[in-house]
Amino acid sequence: MRLGLKAGQWGWSLDELEAAWRVAEEAGLDLISCFDHVSGEPGNSTAWDAPTLLALMAARTERVRLAVQVLNASLRPPLLLAGQLAVVQEASRGRLEVGLGAGSFHLARFDHRVAGIPFPAHAERIRRLEACCGAFPALWRGERVTDGTLGLRDATLGPRATAPPPIVVGGTSDAVLEIAARWAEGWNASSVDPARFERLVERLVSAAERVGRTRPIDRQVQIWAREAPLERLGDLMRSFADAGADTFILVLDEERDPRRVPRIVDALVRGST
């Protein structure tokens, strides 16, 4: 099972984030990740911007893979976002994994409001997610793309990616699972217990059968550190592996002391053995 660390972007300095990334890379973790929010809950600190932070990850690390769980497919102009991600893919020499979601997390509506961007209805966000999953790889391959859902007409990228990064779709609804099965190299679920994760995997397998998918899909779970005491981390990871997880990502909460990162990463590595 691959191991990942998602460091907190609320209340952490860039120096603290970089230190966490270095600890993760030196410990041999497979990936480091960030989230995509413009701000925290009303009144909380703002969050570091995800595409820009991915570029910093690429500059400050050498081997570990870079991920984001997940970019809100409705929050940014799609051509702009695809271009930013192409730059990160090139700067990291092919280490990027692009997480995309429909903006279903409870902060998404607030993100749109503070950014001055209309928050689409759920059905429209689902359509935009699927459209991005189809358009982004084509843009990264240097193709011209026309897509009415995304407002693209004969669009093309200047900085095309030498090798398009894999897309990981995040979410648990039937519509999202089918999008993941149809388009993505990976699927990500958040804050679920092993029993629910196993049921979601069964639904994902059914979705793959419906769309005729035969290639494997990386099944990812991300769990908040507050939900996983370090002394039980190994047992929890084994339970998720038994439930079908291929990748386990531990999310450091914003209130976590960055100085505890080495201990947390050590527990994550030991728990995998």
Image (cartoon, helix red, strand yellow):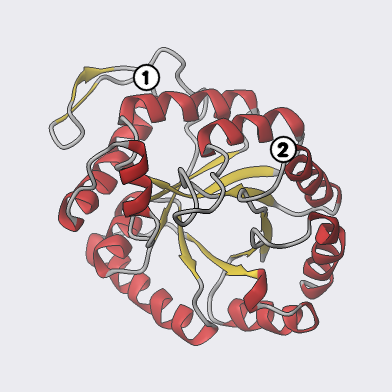
Q: In which quarter of the image is residue 107?
A: bottom left
Mark 1 secondary-structure assignment: loop
Q: Locate the N terminus and report the quarter of the image it occupies.
A: bottom right
Viewer-side label of 2, 1: 2
- Across and down, in percent, residue 25 comes to 80, 47
Nearer the observer, 158 or 259:
259
Q: Quadrant of residue 273?
A: bottom right
Residue at horizontal 78 percent and vertical 60 percent from the top: 257
Q: Quadrant of residue 258?
A: bottom right
Q: In this view, does 273 lie to the left or right of 163?
A: right
Q: In this view, does 4 lie to the left or right of 184?
A: right
Residue at horizontal 53 percent and vertical 23 percent from the top: 87
Q: Is residue 142 left or right of residue 266?
A: left
Count every numbered label the image shows and give the total. Answer: 2
Q: In this view, does 190 lie to the left or right of 248?
A: left
- Across and down, in percent, residue 59 comes to 71, 27
Q: Do the residues labelled 2 and 1 touch (CB within 8 Å)?
A: no
Q: Residue furthest front?
A: 43
The numbered mark, 2 or 1, whose residue comes first in the sequence reads: 2
Kind of residue indicated by mark 1: Gly
Q: Determine crowd level at label 1: few under 14, some 14-19, many 20+ residues with C-alpha closer than 10 A.
A: some
Q: Residue furthest top?
A: 158
Q: Determine crowd level at label 2: few under 14, some 14-19, many 20+ residues with C-alpha closer than 10 A.
A: few
- Across and down, in percent, residue 193 comes to 52, 82
Nearer the observer, 26 or 80:
80
| Residue hosting label 2 | 14
Mark 2 secondary-structure assignment: helix
Residue at horizontal 21 percent and vertical 33 percent from the top: 150
* Label ID, residue 142: 1
Residue 247, compared with residue 94, is above or below; it is below
Kind of residue indicated by mark 2: Leu
